[in-house]
Image: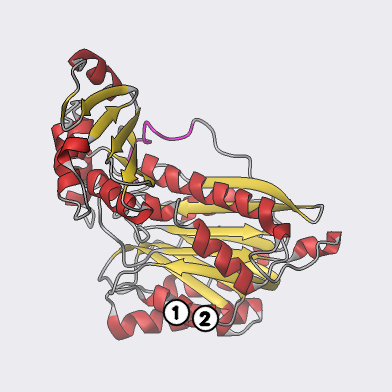
């Protein structure tokens, strides 16, 4: 965790209500960090439906492999998360660490190992000594409570400068349900997904297959539209759990994601995912500015997103933002290299409300002072009109500062 909190951090944290059906506890295991919590345990006293989305990295962590294997069962009773060590690229030792953790959690909660889900974040390539926390899982289960969401978010941080929490409520068939989420992530952030762990829990009663469809759809405009540094982690894990506790209020179980009863829930879930994803970008390592890049008029939405990410991931664009330099030529460069159709002579570019380029050249009314004023803002909007079709997308990133290099130059020490 960095010494100073990101200037883009939220001024206040959401007041996180309890979610019926889940209890949590945190512990200090000393995996990497001293005098701070680094293990989180979530317990579902009744079986919860589970859905998950994971990294597309071809070098995934042992914990990601373990979760993928258990996801088909559709049921969760416990989640164990550690920070400080990613348990990735750790071979046989990594698999042994997940097996020990899962067995210890299953014994603590009284469930099968197939109902346990694991996540690890931190240094890649270092063996994880799971004995440091496996022995305390019984105690964590015993003292777990409903009201520790902010503490839970703190326990999973690595280089994050603040905990990330979000909450929304919705109604399903007239019954009010709650959706709470936590996330961690600050660097190695790029679709799909990011060095990103996120756990979202609702007391709604929704079947696993419907839950999975909701999550898979919701991740597109949120976690898969953010990038800090173009690097995709080995450990990305986003999990959604439905405890079903709202059934006690008369909420009828929903089996199909397309059921109209889920319309309000889907909107609330997507809002939680988007809220958490933006908090991750706003905590980008060394970040001082948040940038929203909207691409319009591309051949397709997918093409618009690729162009947007080409701009968002360009070190030259990101350093220009850091230097408050309205260097729109770098936007032109990033559009041109994206590998999608573009016509130089149809291109138009805006920084905020200021159109800086049009019809393939500098805007006749261009004002360096006006464009520079936009770049001095903390939140900057960049818009690019491709002029070829109706494809549109918005992606989110941050600037690239000297502090990013300092943080990552000595991350392991």
- The answer to whether 347 is drawn above or below residue 146 in the figure is above
Residue 66 is marked as 1
- The answer to whether 288 is drawn above or below residue 154 in the figure is above
**For the point 29% across and 55% down, which residue is it?**
188
Q: Main secondary structure of the magenta part?
A: loop
Residue 70 is marked as 2
Q: Is residue 211 left or right of residue 324?
A: right
Residue 255 on image: x %, y %: 70, 71
Q: Crowding at label 2, few (<14), some or many (≥20) Cα neighbours within 10 Å?
A: some
- The answer to whether 228 is drawn above or below residue 317 in the figure is below
Residue 395 on image: x %, y %: 36, 45
- Residue 293 magenta-drawn? no
Q: Please identify the quarter of the rendering in which residue 161 is found.
A: top left
Give the camera-side residue of 359 and 224.
Answer: 359
Q: Secondary structure at mark 2?
A: helix
**For the point 48% across and 50% down, which residue is it?**
154
Q: Are marks 1 and 2 in contact (CB under 8 Å)?
A: yes
Q: Provide the residue span drawn in magenta.
A: 1-10
Q: Please identify the quarter of the rendering in which residue 75 is found.
A: bottom right
Q: Quadrant of the C terminus?
A: bottom left
Q: Is residue 278 left or right of residue 79?
A: left
Residue 338 on image: x %, y %: 20, 52
Q: Is residue 403 left or right of residue 71?
A: left
Give the camera-side residue of 219 and 163.
Answer: 219
**For the point 47% across and 76% down, which residue is it?**
67
Q: Is residue 19 left or right of residue 158?
A: right
Residue 199 on image: x %, y %: 53, 59
Give the camera-side residue of 352 and 46.
Answer: 352
- Residue 5 magenta-drawn? yes
Residue 82 visible to an observer of this rendering: yes
């Amino acid at each position: 965790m960095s010494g100073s909190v990101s200037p883009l951090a939220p001024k206040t944290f959401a007041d996180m209500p309890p979610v019926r059906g889940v209890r949590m506890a945190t512990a200090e295991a000393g995996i990497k960090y001293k005098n701070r919590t680094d293990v989180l345990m979530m317990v579902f006293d009744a079986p919860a439906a589970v859905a998950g989305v994971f990294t597309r990295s071809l070098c995934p962590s042992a914990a990601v492999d373990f979760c993928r294997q258990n996801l088909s069962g559709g049921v969760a009773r416990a989640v164990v998360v550690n920070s400080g060590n990613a348990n990735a690229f750790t071979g046989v030792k990594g698999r042994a660490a997940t097996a020990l953790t899962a067995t210890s959690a299953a014994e603590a909660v009284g469930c099968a190992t197939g109902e346990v889900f694991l996540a690890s974040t931190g240094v890649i390539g270092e063996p994880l000594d799971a004995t440091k926390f496996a022995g305390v899982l019984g105690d964590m289960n015993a003292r777990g409570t409903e009201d520790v969401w902010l503490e839970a978010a703190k326990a999973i941080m690595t280089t994050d400068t603040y905990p990330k929490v979000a909450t929304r409520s919705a109604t399903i068939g007239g019954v009010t349900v709650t959706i709470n989420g936590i996330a961690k992530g600050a660097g190695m952030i790029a679709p799909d997904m990011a060095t990103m762990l996120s756990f979202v829990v609702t007391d709604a009663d929704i079947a696993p297959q419907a839950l999975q469809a909701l999550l898979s759809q919701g991740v597109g405009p949120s976690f898969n539209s953010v990038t800090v540094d173009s690097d995709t982690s080995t450990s990305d894990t986003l999990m959604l759990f439905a405890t079903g506790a709202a059934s006690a209020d008369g909420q009828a179980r929903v089996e199909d994601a397309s059921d109209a009863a889920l319309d309000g829930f889907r909107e609330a879930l997507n809002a939680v995912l988007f809220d958490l994803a933006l908090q991750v970008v706003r905590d980008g390592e060394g970040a001082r500015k948040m940038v929203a890049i909207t691409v319009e008029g591309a051949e397709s939405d997918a093409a618009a997103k690729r162009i947007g990410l080409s701009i968002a991931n360009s070190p030259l664009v990101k350093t220009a933002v850091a230097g408050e330099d309205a260097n729109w030529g770098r936007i032109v460069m990033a559009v041109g290299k994206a590998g999608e159709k573009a016509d130089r002579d149809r291109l138009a570019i805006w920084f905020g409300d200021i159109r800086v380029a049009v019809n393939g050249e500098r805007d006749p009314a261009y004002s360096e002072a006006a464009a520079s004023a936009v770049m001095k803002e903390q939140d900057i909007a960049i818009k690019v009109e491709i002029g070829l079709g109706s494809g549109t997308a918005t992606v989110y990133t941050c600037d690239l500062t000297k502090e990013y290099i300092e943080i990552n130059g000595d991350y392991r020490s």
